[in-house]
Image (tube, rainbow, N blue to C red):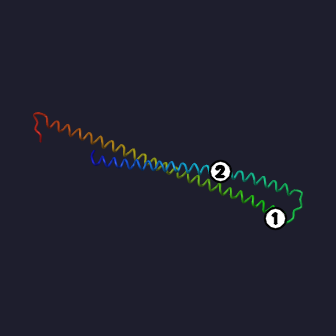
Amino acid sequence: MSAPAIQLRQMLRLREQRERRAKAELDHRIARQTAAHAAAEFAASRLSIQTVQRKSSEAQIYREMLGRRLTPRDVDAVVGRLSNLKAQVERATADAVAAGRAAAAALDAVDEARRDFGNRLRARRKWEYLVADAEQTGQRRSELVDELAAANLRPGRSAP
């Protein structure tokens, strides 16, 4: 095998290694995106549950207040309970938004990894073609040399 063909084969092996690493990175990012999506779904369901609980608790608080004379202490207690419920829902909302952003970022990372893997796959296929072409060219060249040598050594012809 000629030196250029050896170099082409080495480059092909390098391309194959890069492609394998890109595929592993893609698989890793897909797993992270799946986990981020599950976390976002969990956060959304948690927010939904928190919202339902808040509405239910508020309704219960208002039912308890009906027909009663409220002292300032009672009003402060009710305001505190309502503030606590509101804060819980706000935390759940912030968690859901953060989880959604993380899932979107993970999806972007997967798209980037897919593009990188596709580029590396195309590059490897190009190098496979170049190696095969170089090997065929080398084989044709050696066949031509053999034919020329055979033609020059026929009876009636002298070797140069």
Q: Which residue is mark 1?
A: 76
The residue depicted at 75 percent of the width and 53 percent of the height is 53
Dot 1: within a 10 Å radius of its alpha carbon, few (fewer than 14), some, or many (20 or more) residues?
few
The residue depicted at 87 percent of the width and 62 percent of the height is 70
The amino acid type found where label 1 is placed reads Asp
Q: Secondary structure at mark 1?
A: helix
Apparent side of residue 140 relative to residue 151 in the rendered image (left or right): right
Residue 62, image quadrant: bottom right
Where residue 61 appears, as percent x and y from the top left, is 82, 56
The residue depicted at 40 percent of the width and 47 percent of the height is 16
Q: Using the image, tell me which numbered label, if any, was put on residue 42.
A: 2
Dot 2: within a 10 Å radius of its alpha carbon, few (fewer than 14), some, or many (20 or more) residues?
some
Where residue 38 appears, as percent x and y from the top left, is 61, 49
Residue lying furthest top: 155
Apparent side of residue 98 relative to residue 20 in the rendered image (left or right): right
The amino acid type found where label 2 is placed reads Phe
Residue lying furthest bottom: 72
Q: Quadrant of the N terminus?
A: top left
| Vertical relation: 129 (above or below) 63 | above
Where residue 14 appears, as percent x and y from the top left, is 38, 50
The residue depicted at 26 percent of the width and 39 percent of the height is 140
| Vertical relation: 11 (above or below) 140 | below
Q: Quadrant of the C terminus?
A: top left
Where residue 33 appears, as percent x and y from the top left, is 56, 50
Apparent side of residue 71 relative to residue 6 in the rendered image (left or right): right
| Vertical relation: 139 (above or below) 76 | above
Q: Secondary structure at mark 2?
A: helix
Q: Using the image, tell me which numbered label, if any, was put on residue 124.
A: none
Whether residues under marks 2 and 1 lie with C-beta atoms below 8 angstroms apart, the answer is: no
